[in-house]
Structure formats: C-alpha cells, structure tokens
Amino acid sequence: MSKLKEFLVRKDIVISPQRYLIDALGAMAQGLFASLLIGTIIKTESDDLAFDHELILADAIVQLRKWITETHIAFRLLPEKFTLRELQQIHETVLDTKLLVPAFRRKVADLVEDTGEMTGDAGHRPAKLYREKR
C-alpha cells in the first residue's frame, strides 16, 4: 500500500471524491459540448430536428451554462496548460456573450496558477501559460 501512495505522490495523482466528481462533470460537459456542436451542424443542414432533439439540445445548453458558472468544468475543455484568453473563449462560447477581459481575469485569478512558461512559435507577443490550481 505504501508503494502505491509513493507512486501517486511521485506522479502528482490526487484521489478524492471531489476530484472524481469534477472529472465526471468534465466528461459530461465534453459530451454536451459535442452535442451542442453536432446540433449546430444539424441545425444549419436542416431547420427541422427529429422528434424532441431540439428540446434535448436546448436542455444540454442550459445545463452546460449552469455548470460553467458554478463549477470548474471549463478546465476539462482545455489542455493542461492554457492561456487566459483560451479559458475566456470557452466561457464566451458556452455563455454566448462577450466578457470583459479585466473582469474575467479577476474572476479566475484564484482558480489558476502561472506555470512560468510562455506560448511559443506565435506571430505575436507570447502569452503566459496557466494551469488549474489544485
């Protein structure tokens, strides 16, 4: 048992019910986000969705918007290291609204930590990379 604990510490693996819940919600969000995209594609192909699919997609959108404001689910839609702009774009896409940059950065300041790295190979000024605080 001690070898397992040492391995988990060495690999920076955290096992907690809260973490499993967040990961489960993240997987659900990814599924809902994929459904939303598929629904958008279907909607552009045809104005009529079969049966109650439009209602299902509307419910998925409402649920995802609720989760993104109440949980850290947006982090599950990003790579481990991300820019604050990428995080803001996820929120803006799901909420379907433009967010003020300073206000958004204040809101997420306690949720992220600076990795000390910068984006590379960009045709513009490199951005700082962040990760979710644990």
Image (cartoon, helix red, strand yellow):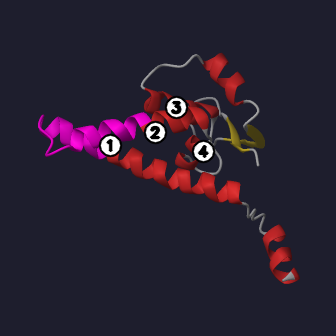
Please tell me whether mark 1 or mark 2 is closer to you in this view: 2
Q: Does 44 sit above or below residue 8?
A: above
| Dot 1 crowding, Cα within 10 Å, few <14, some 14–19, many 20+ | few
Mark 4 / mark 3, whichever is N-terminal: 4
Instruction: Give the residue displayed 41% in from the left and 34% down from the top.
Output: 62
Left or right: 102 with respect to 6? left
- Tell me, yes or no, whether the two marked residues, 4 and 2, touch with CB atoms within 8 Å: no
The magenta-colored residue range is 37-62
Between the C-alphas of marks 4 and 3, the distance is 10 Å
Element on which disc 2 rests: helix
Please tell me whether mark 3 or mark 2 is closer to you in this view: 2
- Tell me, yes or no, whether the two marked residues, 4 and 1, touch with CB atoms within 8 Å: no
Instruction: Give the residue displayed 56% in from the left and 30% down from the top.
Output: 88
Mark 1 / mark 2, whichever is N-terminal: 1
Q: Does 12 sit above or below residue 71?
A: below
Q: Is residue 61 magenta?
A: yes
Between the C-alphas of marks 4 and 2, the distance is 13 Å
Query: Is any atom of residue 41 visible in this view?
Result: no
Kindly identify which numbered label has been placed on residue 64.
Answer: 2
Kind of residue at badge 4:
Phe
Q: Where is residue 80 shown, x and y percent of the image?
A: 64, 51
Instruction: Give the residue displayed 15% in from the left and 41% down from the top.
Output: 49
Instruction: Give the residue displayed 47% in from the left and 33% down from the top.
Output: 65
Between the C-alphas of marks 1 and 3, the distance is 15 Å
Q: Where is residue 36 shown, x and y percent of the image?
A: 34, 42
